[in-house]
Amino acid sequence: MMDEVTGVMINYYFVCKRKLWYFANHINLEDEHENVKIGKIIDESSYNRERKDILIDDTINIDFIRNKKEIHEVKKSRSIEEAAIWQLKYYLYYLDKKGLKGWLGKLDYPLLKKNIEVVLEKDDFQKIEKTQHDIADIIKKETPPQAINSRICKKCAYYELCYI
């Protein structure tokens, strides 16, 4: 199961299960979406001294590593922070399962000039494993889950697909 779930899927699981279903079923509307483009520009133009986009097993893509045991995830805003925290915890979990224990995570918000520390707790292992199983169940379904009708929907690349 671990190899099949990506960090993006973990993030989408906590944002919107419908978005997760679309993404996992290769319905990708994000490449041309303005908010996604802005996020990519922020990621590319921030932390230029760091080696970026460390892809592990085609599963997790760490934005950059600092101080040998500190992984960083760069985000545009804090609007969906819980999803970003769980994405980063999943990266820490993934590294732990590979035998790389004791890593620290940091969520970086360059536009806000803030970062928050993320630590993988013992209780997180069970929640991540349950999330992996839930993701597998969601993406196997014939049709997407119901739209969540949240305040974040209007800024989503899938908004028109869900509501129009």
Image (tube, rainbow, N blue to C red):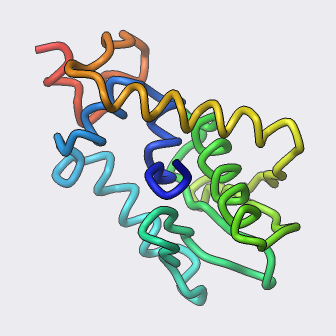
**Quadrant of the image occupied by residue 123:** top right
* 6 w.r.t. 23: above or below: below
Left or right, 34 with reference to 70: left
The residue located at (64%, 58%) in the rendering is 91
Residue in front for this viewpoint, 111 or 141: 141
Is residue 82 visible to us here?
A: yes
Number of disc labels: 0
The residue located at (65%, 53%) in the rendering is 88
**Quadrant of the image occupied by residue 106:** bottom right
Is residue 155 visible to us here?
A: no
Left or right, 75 with reference to 65: left
Q: Quadrant of the C terminus?
A: top left
Percent across and percent down for residue 126 are 76, 35
Percent across and percent down for residue 71 are 70, 69
The residue located at (41%, 24%) in the rendering is 152
* 34 w.r.t. 79: above or below: below
Residue in front for this viewpoint, 149 or 8: 8
The residue located at (67%, 78%) in the rendering is 65
Left or right, 102 with reference to 10: right
Looking at the image, the residue that sits furthest to the front is 1
